[in-house]
């Protein structure tokens, strides 16, 4: 692939909804998600009522990229080679000595399987699993809840509660929950959407229209069901939101949307948000449910009149969006990573001379930082290996960071970050021929830059 990426070269732009087009008010939404699971466990499964008490400080535990070892009750932050960088037993942080004693300086025993988890076709909430990867904001509050459950069960030394967590997730997010006003999550968001949802910036809405006016085909592909999708889109974009997209696909059940064959996952029509008969093929634009990337691509060929239309997909989950779109469909991928705002923004010295008109307005007027670096878990991008004896600590990239540069075309903190750029703006892509930080826009996270590589934002 060439060293640069340009939206003007793409025929089709696809967007995930949650935490991509629709950004949430963090940490309010985190607290609601936590409560939705905790309420179920306490009222339906008899768990300790103390789980319902949540302090703001405890949300610091939530950090993307953590792996939960269900057998040991341990949460792990992994290096790109699978070495354990940080760990906690429940919420209690393990010391460097405890990590070395438990895991040594070697690849964690399940690392190969967890790495392969990216290619699995379903959401990894299987009861038989030995581990769980937390990679998006809907998952993270569940990590804190699980950690607190481990704390409460510590005397038993057995952590057989995962099936109850799965039940809590299914109770709150099952396909009928929105319609039935079931659980805690959907009723609360329906009652006060403005409390949890950020309106789509005018710059982004203008950008979407600009893309359509330029002849681009726009897709919305979300695993949310159609009724929740409509609530979100009407609130953040407006009642005319369907005019922004040529094709809307809900209940897409990603990553299976990309990995499954048409007979495994056919498209279905919708009637009053109820799924109807399976379609043998996808013949025209519209609103559909479930489906697969193969039939979608056949339709895109017809719509563009091209044998090989170029597609780019924007999403916030490595497991559900970025990896499968790249691996199975060979689409370009733009990773939405709010963690890029969790540090003081830095710009490489060599880009300081770039003409102002070629920079997004975002670079001159930075939005309020939506999230901060976890005190307990440190940088999402790098960390120190626990030192052996008196040896100096070694700074290494995290597994999460490695996945970004491997499977993303570029990574940005939000759509707003690029909405004011000209469509022919040339982004430097992640590639083996570019530096490890090249694909981050508008700038790499400070943790990845040496002091001489960066200067403070002016």
Image (cartoon, rainbow, N blue to C red):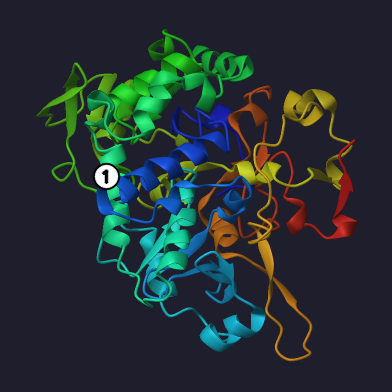
- Identify the residue under disc 1: 170
Of 133 and 429, nearer the camera is: 133
Taking the image as drawn, is residue 306 in sight? no
The image shows residue 326, relative to residue 413, as above or below, that is below
Which residue in the rendered view is the most extreme toward the bottom?
389
Give the residue drawn at x 13%, y 29%.
279
The image shows residue 367, relative to residue 61, as above or below, that is above
Judge left or right: residue 4 versus residue 146: right
Give the residue drawn at x 26%, y 47%.
44
Judge left or right: residue 445 versus residue 132: right
Give the residue drawn at x 55%, y 52%.
62
Measuring from the top left, give residue 205's x and y in whole percent: 55, 16
Measuring from the top left, give residue 296's x and y in whole percent: 28, 32
Which residue in the rendered view is the most extreme toward the front?
49
Q: Quadrant of the C terminus?
A: top right
The image shows residue 155, relative to residue 143, as above or below, that is below
Determine whether the residue tagged by mark 1 lies in a helix, strand or loop. helix
Measuring from the top left, give residue 16's x and y in whole percent: 43, 34
Judge left or right: residue 281 versus residue 122: left
Measuring from the top left, give residue 340's x and y in whole percent: 67, 45
């Amino acid at each position: 692939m060439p060293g640069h990426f340009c939206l003007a070269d793409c025929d089709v732009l696809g967007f995930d909804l949650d935490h991509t087009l629709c950004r949430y008010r963090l940490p309010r939404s985190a607290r609601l998600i936590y409560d939705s699971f905790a309420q179920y466990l306490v009222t339906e499964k008899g768990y300790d009522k103390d789980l319902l008490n949540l302090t703001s400080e405890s949300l610091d535990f939530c950090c993307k990229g953590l792996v939960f070892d269900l057998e040991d009750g341990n949460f792990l932050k992994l290096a790109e080679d699978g070495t354990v960088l940080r760990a906690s037993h429940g919420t209690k942080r393990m010391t460097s000595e405890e990590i070395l004693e438990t895991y040594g300086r070697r690849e964690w025993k399940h690392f190969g399987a967890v790495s392969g988890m990216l290619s699995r076709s379903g959401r990894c909430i299987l009861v038989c699993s030995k581990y769980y990867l937390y990679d998006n904001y809907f998952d993270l509050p569940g990590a804190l809840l699980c950690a607190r459950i481990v704390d409460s069960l510590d005397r038993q030394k057995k952590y057989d509660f995962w099936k109850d967590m799965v039940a809590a997730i299914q109770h709150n997010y099952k396909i009928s929950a929105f319609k039935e006003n079931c659980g805690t999550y959907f009723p609360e968001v329906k009652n006060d959407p403005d409390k949890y949802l950020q309106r789509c910036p005018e710059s982004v809405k203008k950008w979407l229209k600009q893309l359509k006016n330029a002849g681009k085909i726009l897709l919305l592909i979300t695993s949310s069901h159609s009724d929740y999708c409509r609530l979100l889109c009407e609130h953040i974009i407006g009642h005319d939101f369907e005019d922004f997209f040529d094709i809307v696909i809900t209940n897409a059940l990603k990553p299976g949307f990309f990995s499954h064959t048409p007979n495994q996952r056919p498209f279905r029509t919708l009637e009053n948000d109820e799924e109807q008969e399976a379609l043998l093929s996808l013949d025209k634009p519209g609103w559909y449910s479930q489906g697969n990337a193969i039939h979608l691509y056949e339709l895109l060929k017809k719509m563009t009149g091209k044998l090989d239309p170029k597609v780019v997909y924007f999403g916030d989950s490595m497991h559900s969006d970025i990896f499968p779109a790249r691996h199975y469909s060979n689409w370009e991928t733009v990773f939405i990573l709010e963690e890029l705002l969790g540090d003081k923004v830095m710009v490489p010295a060599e880009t300081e001379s770039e003409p102002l008109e070629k920079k997004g307005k975002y670079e001159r007027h930075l939005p309020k930082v939506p999230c901060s670096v976890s005190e307990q878990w440190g940088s999402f991008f790098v960390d120190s290996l626990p030192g052996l004896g008196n040896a100096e600590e070694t700074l290494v990239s995290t597994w999460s960071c490695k996945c970004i540069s491997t499977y993303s075309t570029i990574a940005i903190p939000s759509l707003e970050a690029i909405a004011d750029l000209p469509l022919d703006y040339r982004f430097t892509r992640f590639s083996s021929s570019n530096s490890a930080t090249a694909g981050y826009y508008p700038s790499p996270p400070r943790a990845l830059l040496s002091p001489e590589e960066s200067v403070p934002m002016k």
